[in-house]
Amino acid sequence: MSSSGFMFYENFINALDMLPEGEKEKACYEFCRYGVTGELPEDRNLAMFCIGVSASVRKYSGRGGARENAGRKSKDSNNDFDLNENQKNQKNQKNHNEQTKTETKTETKIQTKTQTKTQTKTETDSAVAPAETVTEYVFEGEVIKLKQKDFDNWQKAYPHLNLYAECVVRDGWLANQPEPERKRWFVSTAAYFAKQNEKRKKQHDDAELVEEFDFGDEA
């Protein structure tokens, strides 16, 4: 007998536990709906939750899973690609919005006859500054803000994690913590990711053993 569905790892429950009371059931429903239809919820926070957690949920189809291993790895790569594309789209959208605001402010200032050329230039430069700040971080949450160098270093240090997804979940948890905990987010998050990386490595190794055992039984 074979069945199709999702294999949920421990980190899915951890992600749900970090959500405020009253949102867990909705988040679970929206994620299952996203997994079946591929449609993200309209709520931005729920959409980010679905994207972040989806990379850590593997599709599993009964026995004989080892024969689907090659196709599954290809799907995992596609998930990573989709996540990176979503990240790029979000960054491009922010840049576009900031650029539009900048152009609008610049045109308004040029039309104001009472302002001098020096004031116009100073205010225009100030309006451009937020657009430059947006591109400074490769991940910018409410608490966690990672530059490209730090993000790349963490990717090398924690190869078994989907780093962007983990940052989304961790940032949501940190946002509800006391100020002292938020201030030391870099050190505490690095330690947390190290533990998660070890857990994920063990889960991966255990899953490989199960697949090899199932394949051997069928033979």
Image (spheres, rainbow, N blue to C red):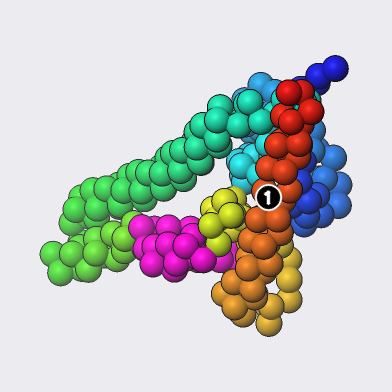
Q: Pointer 1: what residue?
A: 205
Q: Residue at x 79, y 38 (%)?
A: 28
Residue 184 vertical placement versus 168 (above, below): below
**Of 154 and 131, which appears nearest the observer?**
154
- The x, y position of residue 145, in whole percent, is 50, 66
Crowd tier of the residue under label 1, counting other residues whose Cα lies within 10 Å: few below 14, some 14–19, many 20 or above: few
Q: Quadrant of the C terminus?
A: top right
As drawn, the residue found furthest toward the bottom would be: 180
Q: Is residue 152 magenta?
A: yes
Q: Which residues are magenta?
A: 133-157
Q: Is residue 2 visible?
A: yes
Q: Is residue 47 magenta?
A: no
Element class at badge 1? helix
**Of 96 and 143, which appears nearest the observer?**
143
Number of on-image labels: 1
Res 60 quadrant in image: top right
- The x, y position of residue 44, in whole percent, is 62, 42
Residue 26 left/right relative to 66: right
Residue 188 vertical placement versus 46 (above, below): below
Q: Say which amino acid is labelled 1.
A: Asp
Q: Is residue 5 visible?
A: no
Q: Residue at x 57, y 51 (%)?
A: 162
